[in-house]
């Protein structure tokens, strides 16, 4: 057992609290960046954007804990809200200091980073509660995706879980399964978490770079609403995805005649 590290009401108890705080603060930064995307932005105030960051940061963990019948950690440990507020302010600041391509690349990278961590914590807490494997995998999905669901619904766009999303849900479930297998094999806490994280993060990054996506359902006759061109992470970072971003309604900067 790990010794509790406390500072007043702020608590870092055990390895998985640290992982949970990392995931929450990273998701909060993602929430602020997402709220500033043209397809999500709805004339939000500064407070609104910071609340979006908070929802993105703690939303998944709160839902996960409530499903387990626990008081959410984010309400008992002030470190969650404080770190999410700081990360949200950083995301809000970045949204004004960098261009759309940079923000999109950073957002995709950070979501890839936080997704496996939240999935690991969800799996671990479900296992501690004695849930069967399918229940463990369900919470491994809920943790990293519920916050995004709340932001999407609030912004009036289809939730990421139900549309093409570079195996957003699938990779969360796979990360949880890898953790279950490592834990069953008797590996230590950080070995199990590390192996599950590396596999989940690597697959998510490859999916973003290479455009691996869930297959679409068969379209009704005469209806076609999707484009094959999507902004791959590598092309975003290289500044070469103007067409793809425009197809998604994300391109807000118009290059001037002199290229600036």
Image: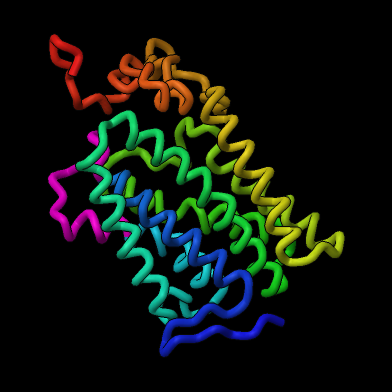
Numbered circles on residues, count: 0
Whether residue 14 is situated above or below residue 4 in the rendered picture: above
Left/right placement of residue 148 relative to residue 138 reads left
The residue positioned farthest toward the right in the image shown: 185
Left/right placement of residue 31 relative to residue 142 reads left
Whether residue 192 is situated above or below residue 1 in the rendered picture: above
Whether residue 36 is situated above or below residue 213 in the rendered picture: below
Q: In which quarter of the image is the N terminus?
A: bottom right
Where's residue 46, x and y in %? Answer: 16, 56
Q: Is residue 30 visible?
A: yes
The magenta segment is 36-53
The quadrant in which residue 58 appears is: bottom left
The residue at 38%/17% (across/down) is: 240
The quadrant in which residue 101 appears is: top left
Q: In which quarter of the image is the C terminus?
A: top left
The residue at 41%/22% (across/down) is: 238
């Amino acid at each position: 057992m790990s010794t509790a590290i406390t500072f007043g009401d702020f608590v870092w108890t055990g390895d998985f609290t640290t992982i949970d705080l990392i995931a929450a603060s990273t998701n909060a930064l993602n929430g602020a960046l997402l709220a500033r995307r043209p397809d999500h932005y709805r004339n939000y105030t500064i407070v609104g954007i910071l609340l979006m960051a908070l929802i993105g940061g703690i939303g998944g963990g709160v839902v996960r804990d409530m499903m387990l019948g626990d008081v959410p950690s984010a309400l008992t440990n002030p470190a969650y809200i404080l770190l999410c507020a700081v990360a949200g302010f950083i995301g809000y600041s970045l949204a004004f200091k960098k261009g759309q391509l940079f923000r999109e690349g950073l957002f995709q990278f950070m979501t890839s980073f936080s997704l496996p961590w939240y999935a690991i914590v969800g799996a671990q807490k479900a296992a501690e509660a004695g849930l069967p494997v399918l229940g463990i995998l369900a919470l491994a999905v809920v943790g990293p995706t519920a916050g995004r669901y709340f932001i999407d619904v609030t912004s009036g766009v289809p939730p990421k879980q139900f549309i093409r999303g570079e195996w957003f849900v699938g990779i969360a479930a796979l990360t949880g399964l890898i953790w279950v297998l490592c834990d069953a094999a008797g590996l230590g806490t950080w070995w199990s978490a590390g192996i599950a994280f590396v596999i989940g993060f690597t697959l998510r990054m490859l999916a973003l770079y290479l455009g691996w996506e869930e297959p679409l359902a068969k379209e009704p006759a005469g209806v076609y609403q999707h484009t094959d061109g999507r902004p791959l992470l590598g092309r975003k970072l290289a500044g070469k995805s103007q067409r793809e971003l425009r197809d998604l309604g994300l391109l807000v900067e118009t290059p001037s005649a002199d290229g600036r």
